[in-house]
Amino acid sequence: MTDLFKYLSERPYPGRGIMLGATPSGKSVCAYFIMGRSENSRNRVFEKTADGIRTRAWDESKMTDPSLIIYHPVRRVGRGTVVTNGDQTDTVRDHILAGQTFAAALRTREFEPDGPNWTPRISGLLSPDGSFKLSILKAGSESGAPCLRYFYEYEAAQPGAGRFISTYEGFGSPLPSFHGEPVEVGVPELDAAALAGRLWAALNEDNKVSLYVSAGGEEVIINKWEESK
């Protein structure tokens, strides 16, 4: 089982990341972070909404293109939680409300149209019973097409364990997409604030932007801009 904190500390740019799992005592855990290289990507914060969180510009005057960076990363649907790195959060939520599935929703979407990186869309669904799903939609060639869709289902969260997936493996030109099955990681017995603190400390100082953690019903947001006020 991989030490997630060490894993993240060794990777200066995983991009966006999702971790779903459970603490040793069985508390469901959801974590999502964003990183950025450009001024536009770094000019963001997370803020709470009625059903989850959204991204917004820290300085509206510096926002140049909101199309791929302003969205709702987390939305609760019933007692479940949808978490993604883009506006496919709404696609998944709408399909679930219509009685359809996580996979059916994501079959209507593909990777982001930001060639040559073709940023993957990563998505997760955490259910009330602790089971969860993860997905990555990524480009199949340097030109983008075809879209490769991968789905992973975990019938029950193993106490003290979770799965982690990110958009990238690290730096490169173009940025190398995450590959392989979501990484099995250890989840310590920490409350949301303590877990968020350790994850935030593990992320690269220059590139980290915002972090969200939910554990046992508690939610914590850390924004780099608010830390530096």
Image (cartoon, helix red, strand yellow):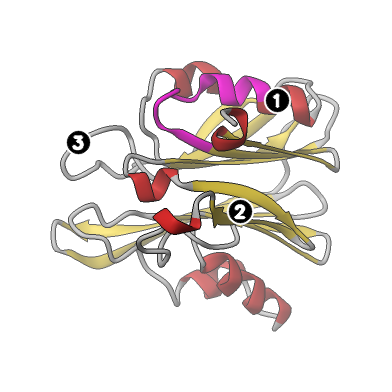
Looking at the image, tell me whether mark 1 or mark 2 is earlier in sequence order. Answer: 2
Q: Is residue 185 visible?
A: yes
Looking at the image, tell me whether mark 1 or mark 3 is earlier in sequence order. Answer: 3
- Local secondary structure at mark 2: strand
Is 173 rendered above or below residue 190? below
Expressed as whole percent of the image width and height from the top left, the position of residue 187 reads: 68, 25
Q: In the rendered picture of this protein, how many numbered marks are placed on residues?
A: 3
Find out whether the residues at labels 3 and 2 contact each other: C-beta distance under 8 Å.
Answer: no
Q: Residue at x 43, y 43 (%)?
A: 42
Can you tell which quarter of the image residue 116 is in?
Answer: bottom left
Amino acid at the residue labelled 1:
Leu
Disc assigned to residue 195: 1
Disc assigned to residue 172: 3
Q: In the rendered view, does 199 fall on the left or right side of 147?
A: right
Find out whether the residues at labels 1 and 2 contact each other: C-beta distance under 8 Å.
Answer: no
Q: Where, quadrant-wise, is the N terminus in this rendering?
A: top right
- Local secondary structure at mark 3: loop
Mark 3 to mark 2 CA distance (whole Å): 28 Å
**Residue designated by label 2:** 133
Foreground: disc 1 or disc 2: 1
Mark 1 to mark 2 CA distance (whole Å): 21 Å
Specify start and end residues of the magenta stretch as a single range. 197-209
Foreground: disc 3 or disc 2: 3
